Each structure stands twice: as structure tokens, then as C-alpha cells.
Amino acid sequence: MENHKMIKVQNLINAPIEKVWELWTLPEHIKNWNIPFANWHTPFAENDLKVNGKFKFTMASKDGKEGFDFEGIYTKVEKFSLIEYQLLDNRIANVRFENLGSETKLTETFEPEATISEEMQEQFCQSVVLKFKEYVENFE
């Protein structure tokens, strides 16, 4: 690994950790919040949340002109606390969940992709995390 710089985004979500964990990890919910831009969607999501379990989320523009699969393998899973994973291109990432009672602090840290600007990747991830926050806080 040549590049050890990591990108970190976080948000404070007004919901208990159990709800945040469930909505972050279940495929039927991932499809509803894993959206970086209004004209994008996630038509496919599978998630086997365990060590060596695989995940794959297809993210695409609604017009079908752009898209990619976000996929990898989980390397560490600590319920209500930490998810670590490795993407197919060997980049590493993690998501931390911090229980603050009625709120949950979610922090996502990842190794940037070399061919896209780090600023763009940070904005992309931050917009997904913001969409997740809105989804959780409005989910009944």
C-alpha cells in the first residue's frame, strides 16, 4: 500500500444505536439510503455481515449512464460498535458506531481510490452519510 492517507466522514444521528445498526446493515434499508446524489439509486444490495462475509451494493445513475459495484469482504464485525472491510481493489475501510444514548455517532474511514480526487470521494461519502442520517431520523 503506497497511500496510507485515509478519508474520514462522520455524523451525529438522532437515534439509538440498535436502530442505526439495523438500518445501516440490512439490504432492504441500504437500497433506500445508499444514494450520493438525487439522480442516483442503489438498485441492488446484498450484505452478509460476518467476518469473511461478502457485500455488494450496485450504485447507479437513474438514467443508467453511470454506475459501479461497491463490493468487498468483512474483516472484523463487532455488533453495535465496528465494521471493518476490504474492498475488491484491496483498499481498507471501517465504520464505527458510538452509542451516545438517544444519539449515535457514526464515523466512516476509508482509503481513497487513486483515480478520483480525494475531495470528490469525501463529498460523495459525506453525502451518503447525510442521506443515511435523514433516512434513520425519518424512519418509523
Image (cartoon, helix red, strand yellow):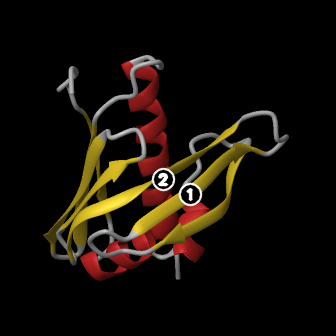
Horizontal side of residue 48 vs 46, given as left or right: left
Element marked by disc 2:
strand
Quarter-of-image position of residue 9:
top left
Crowding around mark 1 (Cα neighbors within 10 Å: few <14, some 14 to 19, many 20+) is: many
Above or below residue 122? Residue 105 is: below
Closest to the camera, between mark 2 and mark 1, is 2
On residue 57, which mark appears?
1
Front in this rendered view, residue 75 or 128: 75
Determine the residue positioned at 48% across, 41% down. Answer: 127
Above or below residue 90? Residue 70 is: below
Determine the residue positioned at 31% across, 63% down. Answer: 74
Q: Which residue is mark 2?
A: 71
Quarter-of-image position of residue 105:
bottom left
Element marked by disc 1:
strand
Determine the residue positioned at 53% across, 82% down. Answer: 140
Q: Circles 2 and 1: CB distance less than 8 Å?
A: yes
Which residue type carries mark 1? Answer: Phe
